Structure formats: structure tokens, C-alpha cells
Image (cartoon, grey):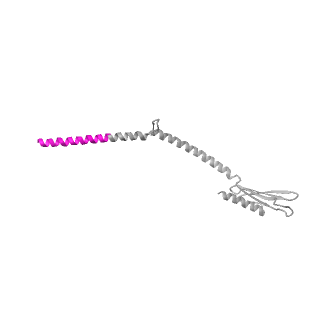
């Protein structure tokens, strides 16, 4: 029985030694993990925590989101205002009467992005100049347009289409 008791004592001693080594290894790993945690969760020299950094970032994102929403509203207002502004211009100069020299007469088309606007015509003669204005809606006029006025309106439409 003495031999069996010695074997049991040696086996138990070996188990205790393995357990102690295992505990020391786990303690070492835990210490390294704590050091890594300090490194990860510490931001900058002021020793601010990661939670504080995340809160700061969340505040900045919220501020940026608010600013983007305001800028989006302004952009929509600007787009609404510019849709009614003159975007297409067409100008055709021509000689209205055979007895006058040069291309002193003209047709000027001014239209917004939807083709609403006016065609202005000035007919230059030796004794007088006549000016006419014809409305335009959707690139069409309820008034009859002359050849030069049609060309000016086509130029205005092309200038609007070339922007898109």
C-alpha cells in the first residue's frame, strides 16, 4: 500500500502543479487583455474613454445630419426659384424691310426650364421701329409666330436642353 499511496501523492502533486501553471498562464493572459483594453478604450492624452469619444462622434453626426437637412431645404428652395427663372435665350437678327440696311431687326425668345416665357420682336424701319411681345407656354405660343420668332424660340429651347 505504500507504493500505491506514493503514486497517488505524485499524481495529485502533478495535478496541483499543472493547475497552478494553468492559473498563472490565465492570470498572465488576463493582465495582457487588461492592458489591451486600456489601450483601446483610452483616447488621447486627456485619458477620455471610448464611450466619451463615441458620444462626441454621435453628437457630430447629429449636427451634420441637421445641417444636411437645412442645406437640402435650401437647395429645394433654390431649385424651385430657378425653375421659374430665364434659362433659355434665343436671339435672331434679321432684315425686316428691303429698304433698310443691315440686320437691325431681331427676335428674342426668353423662356424658363418648362418653356414658359415671351418672344420679343423688334422690326426696324427707316422711320419707326415696332416692338411686339408674344407669350409662350410649354414652348408654344397662342399667337402666330414669324419665321425668325420660331428660330429664336428653337434656339432658346436648345439652350435649355443643352444644360440638362
Does residue 127 appear left or right of residue 33 in this picture? right
The answer to whether residue 87 is magenta is no
Extreme front residue here?
45
The answer to whether residue 8 is magenta is yes
> What residue is rendered at 26% in x and 40% in y?
20
Q: Quadrant of residue 131?
A: bottom right
Q: Quadrant of residue 132?
A: bottom right
Q: Main secondary structure of the magenta part?
A: helix
Extreme right residue here?
127
Q: Is residue 49 above or below residue 146?
A: above
Q: Whole-percent x and y of residue 153? A: 73, 60
Q: Whole-percent x and y of residue 96? A: 82, 62
Quadrant housing the N terminus = top left
> What residue is rendered at 28% in x and 42% in y?
22
Does residue 105 appear left or right of residue 78 in this picture? right
Residue closer to the observer: 140 or 109: 109
Q: Whole-percent x and y of residue 102? A: 83, 61
Judge whether residue 33 can be spotted in this image: yes
Q: Is residue 149 above or below residue 54?
A: below
Q: How many marks?
A: 0
> What residue is rendered at 25% in x and 41% in y?
19
Bounds of the magenta segment: 1-27
Amino acid at each position: 500500500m505504500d507504493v500505491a499511496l506514493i503514486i497517488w501523492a505524485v499524481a495529485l502533486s502533478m495535478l496541483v502543479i499543472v493547475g497552478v501553471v494553468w492559473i498563472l498562464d490565465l492570470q498572465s493572459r488576463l493582465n495582457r487583455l487588461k492592458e489591451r483594453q486600456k489601450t483601446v478604450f483610452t483616447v488621447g492624452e486627456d485619458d477620455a474613454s471610448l464611450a466619451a469619444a463615441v458620444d462626441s462622434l454621435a453628437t457630430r453626426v447629429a449636427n451634420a445630419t441637421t445641417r444636411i437637412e437645412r442645406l437640402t431645404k435650401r437647395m429645394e428652395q433654390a431649385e424651385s426659384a430657378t425653375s421659374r427663372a430665364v434659362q433659355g435665350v434665343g436671339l435672331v437678327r434679321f432684315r425686316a424691310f428691303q429698304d433698310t440696311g443691315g440686320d437691325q431687326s431681331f427676335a428674342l425668345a426668353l423662356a424658363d426650364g418648362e418653356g414658359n416665357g415671351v418672344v420679343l420682336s423688334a422690326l426696324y424701319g427707316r422711320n419707326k421701329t415696332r416692338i411686339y411681345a408674344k407669350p409662350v407656354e410649354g414652348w408654344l405660343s397662342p399667337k402666330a409666330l414669324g419665321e425668325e420668332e420660331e428660330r429664336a424660340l428653337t434656339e432658346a429651347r436648345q439652350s435649355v436642353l443643352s444644360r440638362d
